[in-house]
Image (tube, coloured by chain):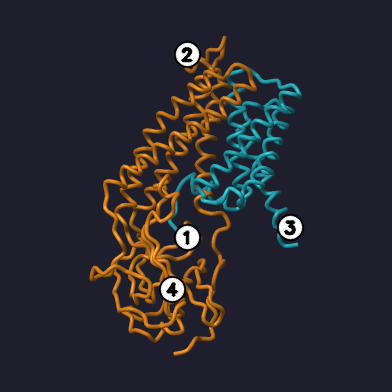
Chain colours: A cyan, B orange
Amino acid sequence: MRTSRGPVAWIAAVLEQLGVCGNAGVAVGVMSGFMLTIVDVIEGPLALTNAEAVRVWLLLGAFGWLALLFIFTVFARWTASSVALPALVSSALVTALIVLVVRVTGLYLLAWMIGILAGMLVGSILCTLYKRVGSA
Amino acid sequence: MACINDRPNCGSAESGVVPEALREIVSWIVIIWGAIGAAIAVLKALGTITVSGGIISVGGAAIATGFFAGAAIGFAVAVTTFIVVFLSARERCTNSAAEPQCVAGVVERVVESFSEARDEWAPWQAKHDRVDLIVKSFFWQIVEVGAAYVYCTEAPFPRQSEIMRCYFYDRRVCAAAMGATVGAAVGAVAGIIAAAAIAAALCITVILCIFGLVLAAFVAAAIVLGGAAIGGQIGKAGSMDEDPVSDTGQAIVIGHLLTVNGPMERRGYDNGANVIYWVSAAQLHGTSTSPQPFSYCEINDEFEDGCVRAPIVE
C-alpha cells in the first residue's frame, strides 16, 4: 500500500486501531465540537439552558448523522442503507456526550478537542459492542 | 494436470480493518478541523480575537461574526474535500514504485474504467481498466505475498481459484482526475464564499446560527464536489478511451490466456489485495478452450506462460 508520512500517517495509524466505529465517532466529534467552538467565539461565552442544550444536541446529532452518511457513501463507497442506523447511533451518542461535557465544564472553546476524545471513546465502545453481538 | 490439494487462501488474511478511503478522509478531517479549532481557541484565549456588537476583530481586521463563522466552516469543509479529491486523483495517476511481478492465467473478467454510474459524478474516484486473471496455482504464492487479501472464484474446492487484479493504465481516468482537481479548487473558493454568506444571514440566535453552520457546511461540500464533477467531465471529454490491450495491440477479452508483468502492490481500494498496478507488458497466448467457469485445474497445463520461474522472496 502506498504510505503517507508525518502527522497524517500518525493519525491514520491511530485511527486504524479505533476501527470503523471509532473513525466515525472521531469524525462526528471533531466536526460537531468545532461548530460549538465557533459559536462560542462569535456568540460570547455560551451558557445553554436545558432546552437550548437539547436543541443544540438534536441539531448537531442530525448534522453528524448526515455528515457520516455523506462521508461513507461519497468517499468510502458504502451503501447508505448499511451505515444509516450505526451512523445515527454513533452521531447521537457522540454529540450528546460533547454537549453534556462542555455544558458541565464550560469548556466550549475546547469543544473540538472534547469532540475528538468523545468520538474515540464512544466509537471504541460501539465497536466492542458490535463485535460482541456479532460473535454471540 | 488435475486440481491440487492446496486450498487457496481466499478472503480476509491480514488486511486492514478500516478501509483506506475512510481512514484517509477522517485523518484529514481531524487535522484540518482540529488545527483550525485549535488556532481559533488559542487566538481567542490570547485576546487576538475579540467580539463586540456582532463584529469580530481578528488581529485588527473586523468582519461580521456570522460571516466569520461561515467562512471558517466553509474553509474547513472546502479544504478537506479538496484535499481528498486531490489525493485520490494523484493516487490514481502516480506510477507505482513497487517491485515488478509476473503472473499468468486466463482472463475471467474485464472491467472498463467508468463502468459504474457514480464514476460519472465522482470522476476523481474512477478506476483504470481492470482485468481479473485466474492465475495458475504456481502464482498463488505471489497473489498471497504479505498475507494480503485474496480474491477467488466462487467455485467450490478443489476447483476454487485465486484471482489477480491487473490494472491497465487509462489516460482518460487521469484526464478526468486532473479536471476534477481543478474543478474542486474552483469549487472550494465558491464554497467558502457561499458558506460565509449563508452563516452571515442565519447567525442571529445560537440555535439558528448552528443550523446556519450546518447548512453552510453541506452547501460548501456540495459546491466543491459539484466543481469536481464538472471539471472531471470536462477532462474526460477531452481524452480518448483506451481499452486494455496485449503487447501486440489486440483487445483483451474474457478467455484470453495472458502473461502479465508490472509492479505489484497492496491497494486499500482493493480490500488490501495484491494487484498489478499498472500492467507494463501483457503477452497473449491465445484463447482458452477450457470449459467455463474457468479454473486453474485446466489452466495450469493449457499453455506455456512467459514468466521466469524463480523462488519468491517475501
Residue A104 figure quarter:
top right
Q: Nearer the viewer, mark 4 or mark 1?
A: 1
Give the vertical position of A34 relative to B127 (above or below).
above
Amino acid, disc 3: Val
* Chain of the residue under the numbered disc 3 shown in the image: A
Amino acid, disc 4: Ile
Residue B297: % across, % down? 46, 84
Amino acid, disc 2: Ala
* Chain of the residue under the numbered disc 1 shown in the image: B
Residue B66: % across, % down? 53, 19
The crowding category of the residue bearing disc 2, from other C-alpha atoms within 10 Å (few below 14, some 14 to 19, many at least 20), is some
Residue A43 figure quarter:
top right
Marks 2/4 same chain: yes
| Residue B142 image label | 4
Mark 2 to mark 4 CA distance (whole Å): 62 Å
Mark 4 to mark 3 CA distance (whole Å): 36 Å
Q: Secondary structure at mark 2?
A: strand
Count the marks.
4
Q: Which residue bears the numbered disc 1?
A: B270
Residue A18: % across, % down? 62, 50
Mark 3 to mark 2 CA distance (whole Å): 54 Å
Instruction: In this rendered view, identify the residue nearer to me: B277 or B232.
Output: B232
Which residue extends farthest left? Answer: B248
| Residue B62 image label | 2
Q: Nearer the viewer, mark 2 or mark 1?
A: 1
Mark 4 to mark 1 CA distance (whole Å): 16 Å
Closer to the N terminus: mark 2 or mark 1? 2
Q: Secondary structure at mark 1?
A: helix
On-image quarter of the C terminus of chain B: bottom left
Closer to the N terminus: mark 2 or mark 4? 2
Q: Which residue bears the numbered disc 3?
A: A133
